Amino acid sequence: MAYTTIDKVRLMTNLSTADVSDEDITNLIAEATKELNSLINVKVIREEIEYIDSYRQNKIDGSNTTFYVKNWKDRYLADMNDDGTVDVNDIEVIIADPTTNSETTATVSSISPSEGKFTLSSAPAAGQKLYVTYEWCYRDPSEPDPLIGLACTLLVSAYCYAKINIGRAPQVAFGNTKIYRHIDSFDHYYQRFLKIVSQINNRLPDTKEATLIENG
């Protein structure tokens, strides 16, 4: 599922289809997802799968298919391919065989973002090594977490007003009638977006987050 929806953006902005089409908002959601992910996700490249603790032993023995990344505690597997969902396409696992000096890409059958866990379709053999590439963030993007959803909605709202207002005069006169555009709308939504991103990355206590959101 995407981080936000057309209806949420329209509720936030009061923009109608005459202002911005549904198709345009859908495209802007895709672009906003990329920008948001770039600010809240951390990419880990070729992390070797090793023993973590007695529960997350990460045994490579020819029978075990379930493994954990090192960034499992208080962190979540994230949306690496920027499609607004967290699934098996957001993690890459390489099986290295030192006996043949070869590497193959493993098939990931499932992941658990909240546990930092992934399951392979078949077990790597004893003596082989696993390397995983993935992204993590402090909030769960698979639901998505309310703060991630809010951040994306705010960013899309900013994009919408940029599309409408940039390059246009702030005031248009038709005889004695004057029409004013709220040129500052982009900055309003974008600054709110940056505040929410800061909260996501700083892991503020929930009570403090709620207060900051209410105060804008």
Image (cartoon, rainbow, N blue to C red):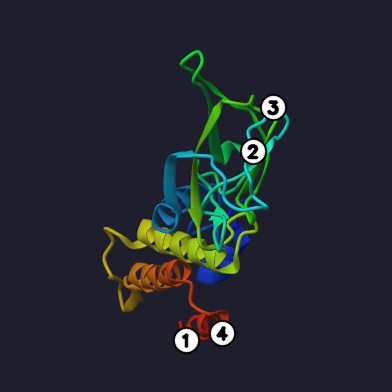
Q: Of the residues under marks 3 and 4, which one precedes in the sequence?
A: 3
Mark 1 vs mark 3, CA separation in Å: 55 Å
Which residue shows up at 63% across the image and 33% down it? 60
Looking at the rendered structure, the secondary structure element under dot 4 is helix
Q: Is residue 181 visible?
A: no
Q: Which mark is residue 215?
A: 1
| x 32%, y 70%: residue | 183
Judged by depth in the image, the label closer to the viewer, 3 or 4, is 3
Secondary structure under the numbered disc 1 in the rendered image: loop
Going by the numbered disc 3, the residue's amino acid type is Gly
- Mark 2 or 4: in front is 2
Q: Where is residue 93 in the image (x, y as percent from the top left)?
A: 55, 32
> How many neighbours does mark 4 have within 10 angstroms: few (below 14), some (14-19), or many (20 or more)?
few
Q: Name the residue under label 3.
A: 62
The residue beneath circle 4 is 207
Q: Quadrant of the C terminus?
A: bottom left
Instruction: Give the distance between the C-alpha atoms of the residues marked 1 and 4, in whole angstroms.
Output: 13 Å
Name the residue at the top extreme. 100
Q: Which amino acid does label 1 sit on?
A: Asn
First in sequence, mark 1 or 3: give its number. 3
Callout 2: SS: loop
Query: Spatial distance from mark 3 to mark 4, Cα to Cα?
Result: 47 Å
